[in-house]
Image: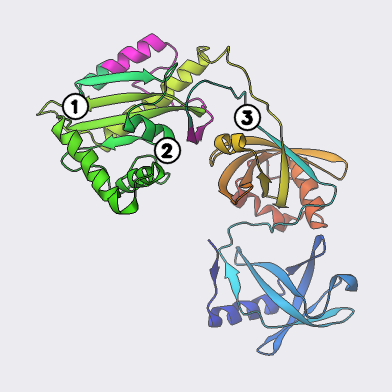
Amino acid sequence: MATTLKRIEKEFILNAVMEEKISLLLIAGAGEWPVLFTSVGDEGIALTHNMPLRLLRRGESYELRFVYREQPMAFRSKVLDVKEASLALEMPGTVYKNLGRRYSRRAPPAQLSVSFSFKGDRYDLAFPVTREFDPVVEPEPSSSFDPADIRALVRDFDTRAGEYAGERAVRMFKERVPESLEERLIVRTGKIYYLPTAVGGLPLVDPYVRPRIVTRELLGDFFREQGTRDDLVDDEIARFERNKKSSGVLSELMVPMVFQEYVIGYVYLVNKQIGKPPFDLGLLETFHQFSKILVYSLKINGYFRNAPKKASDFPAEVIDISAGGLLFANASKELAASLLPGSAIEVSIRTGGRETRAAGTVKRTYRDAELVYYGVEYEEMAPEDFRFLFEALYGRAFTDADATGIEGLGIRMPLKLD
């Protein structure tokens, strides 16, 4: 996340940039233009430039970017005076460092069009839809579970789970809908229902960097979605936990089996036998891994083979775009249910009479009353496509200095762009 320089640090760095003759990029029109400081003071800053004067207007603010000690920085400043080769601007009030992205965003060029598709085949399945999305890639090798033989996989599960749980099962949602509160909860959220002990109740916090379990807060949100008044939510959570204790449950675990945007079933373990150890996070990890391996096994063994395929190409209304990603909008409710953070997509960008392609990942989504907005980061792109896109967006040649930003973007490609 971007942070601001304190006043003394700001003045020191701007003066160092001037003394070391570090080039800045001034963003104007459809391009980035190199400029150099000639003076820095309380009254303002002065720069030399070689820009078309039509791009510069007195009283207008412009963004400037530079790299100091390998740290990208940026600020905005208002133009005080414009001359043929020099420029006077106000002293910037704020200079930002720790920028979230190496390359600045641009409004889409007039002739740019973008479409995208999901990686691999997408299926139209008769299973409940969740908020999560799992592209179902090959799981990490496991010493406990082998995806090649489904029957052997289920037998291994039964043996392992039997060490901890009196009741264990793999329950599918084929030809039935989620019924119990817990089933509806894991389908709605796509997260793991985990009751370590009935005495302690649901977890208060999720220890994972990428949240994956149902906490007390998340259960409260679920009750509110179901129409429970705010002042009654805590009572509903307490009643839920009391019911678990009164029914003899000591520990309980339900791990959703997520295939694309569907919950096709779940892995269930419950212990009611006094003396057995409570379910810990190590157990949760084991059977979370099993659920992923089982879904992958179903896929490679043809469980979804005869299901109808969904359309693969979607148009994207681009809001802004950079050399590292783009933000687009779409009104489709069906797409919103499928295209979730973490989704892997293929992006096709057409501009300047050429098509460039990139593998990307949806990093974030948000919505307003009519549209859903998707922030996408490119993950893989051919070097020649990256160079072309960069030059089309920024109106200048790609340089060695720009190449230092590729790693920060996560673009996996050969760094030699000659």
- Local secondary structure at mark 3: loop
Residue 65 position, x and y percent, is 69, 67
The stretch in magenta equals 130-158
- Amino acid under disc 3: Lys
- Amino acid under disc 2: Thr
- Amino acid under disc 1: Asn
Whether the residues at callouts 3 and 1 have beta carbons within 8 Å, the answer is no
Whether the residues at callouts 3 and 2 have beta carbons within 8 Å, the answer is no
List the residue tagged with mark 2. Answer: 189
List the residue tagged with mark 1. Answer: 271
Name the residue at 55% across, 78% down: 9
Name the residue at 58% across, 22% down: 124
Q: Vertically, is 172 above or below 402? A: above
CA gap between label 3 and label 1 equals 39 Å
Question: Image quadrant for the C terminus?
Answer: top right
List the residue tagged with mark 3. Answer: 119
